[in-house]
Image (tube, rainbow, N blue to C red):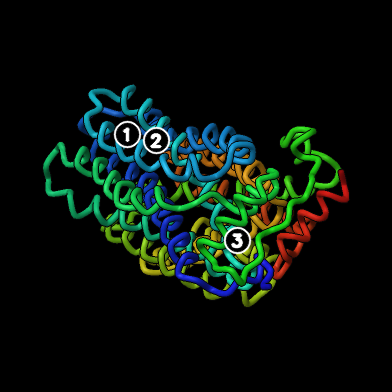
Amino acid sequence: MIEYDEAPLRPFHLRVAIASSGGVFSDGFGLGIIGIALSRAGAQMHLSAVWLGLLGGASLLGLFAGALLTGPVADRFGRRPIFAHNMLLLGALSVVQSFAGSAAQLLLLRLAIGFLLGTDYVVSKALLTEFTPRTLRGRALGSLSIAWAGGYACAYLVGVLLDRGDPGAWRWTLATSAIPCLLVLPLRLTLPESPLWLANGGREEDAARVVRRVLGETVSPPARREVAAIRRGRWRQLLSARWRGRTAVACAFFTCQVIPYFALGTFVSQVMSALHLRNAHTAGLLYNLALLLGAVAGLITVDRIPRRVFLIGSFYLTAASLLAVSVVPELPPLATIGLFALFAGVLSAASNLVYVYLPELFPTDLRASGIGLAIASSRTGSAFSTFLLPVIVESYGVRTALDACVAVLVLGALVCQRWAPETRNVPLSSLDAATTESA
């Protein structure tokens, strides 16, 4: 019999990857669409810099709550219930937001959308991790990064294409974020629960039934492991001596990575304009293209070099590129765009590690909770930074905002250099065993 973690590639694995990637594409689209919509809605709704910041960061703040609350729920009740149905609710709210009559209404809807996005960030990573064989895990999870960057870049492109001078075009722009949600929904409804979660919950027969049906008779179902996390509380276990170091690394690296990603990405057109580039929208398109190409490059790279090297090197390289834009006087426009493209490409490549490295840090019974806590931490930082960026640019100038992003990236590099473990080629079963031994 073949071990569950060593199963050969089956068509079912591709179904899971597409269902997860489709949701992550929807997540990226839903977050990316607000920046280009606000660039048009701002004037029509007479939004101040504070309101622009609030609306730009609202979904990220909602993500905090969604991810934080979903982790323990998914670890206790399973991944599938949330995975199967959150896209339906997300699609519905995506349409409703286009009818918002005031900034306050749009703010509440963006918070709710962010909450649902947070649920999907947790369950998509956890479910794909637990279904994918060890040898394919890096590439499968890395594909989520491409899906997210693709959704984020497509949102910007759709916003530009729909902008034909119509003052109300931003409403149609927001409504388009429902399309990918509804397209992926049928596929999600047909997927089973994670056999690893079933087995660890004492439902070995259900786990074996799922494995036989989707992977065949030659693959053995995962064995049950009794763990302390269920008895002692998942958040408490994440902060225990055995796991607190990995929990701290997960929160720190993800937070330091996404603060500049969202702060600059959400308001890329405004940042380019503040740097006196003539065609800010074109520069924004190039920036988003670099995000997509970087995600592809990251997928190719993620299993070829140690996780630590990839993680630490990406922080230093992105910090250096932003620092050059900030400190070099009279930088030519082409050089400015090139450095921003380098920053976007490298940061997007490293975002593969969000999908690959985070799940590898935690055992099965803490995985969704650990991912959720890291996402909540990251979205708190990114929400506040996205809120503050237009305010800082207006009050202190764009170079001050860039310097702040550089400081965050350097902090991330230093934390990971000191504490981040290497996880490449580590079987998930060894993490579950470590949890058992620490019980």
Label 2 SS: helix
> x, y (%) of residue 175?
24, 41
Along the viewing direction, whichever of 396 and 139 lies nearer the viewer? 139
What amino acid type should be assigned to the residue bearing mark 3? Answer: Val
- Crowd class of label 3 (few under 14; some 14 to 19; many from 20; radius 10 Å): many
What amino acid type should be assigned to the residue bearing mark 2? Answer: Ile
Along the viewing direction, whichever of 255 and 83 lies nearer the viewer? 83
> x, y (%) of residue 191?
45, 53
What amino acid type should be assigned to the residue bearing mark 1? Answer: Leu
Side (left or right) of 240 relative to 345: right
Task: Determine whether label 1 and label 3 are within 8 Å by CB.
Answer: no
> x, y (%) of residue 284?
33, 57
Label 1 SS: helix
Q: CA distance from mark 3 to mark 2?
A: 25 Å
Image quarter in which the N terminus is found: bottom right
Q: List the residue tagged with mark 1.
A: 93
**Upstream in sequence: badge 1 or badge 3:** 1
Q: List the residue tagged with mark 2.
A: 113
**Upstream in sequence: badge 3 or badge 2:** 2
Q: Quadrant of residue 434?
A: bottom right
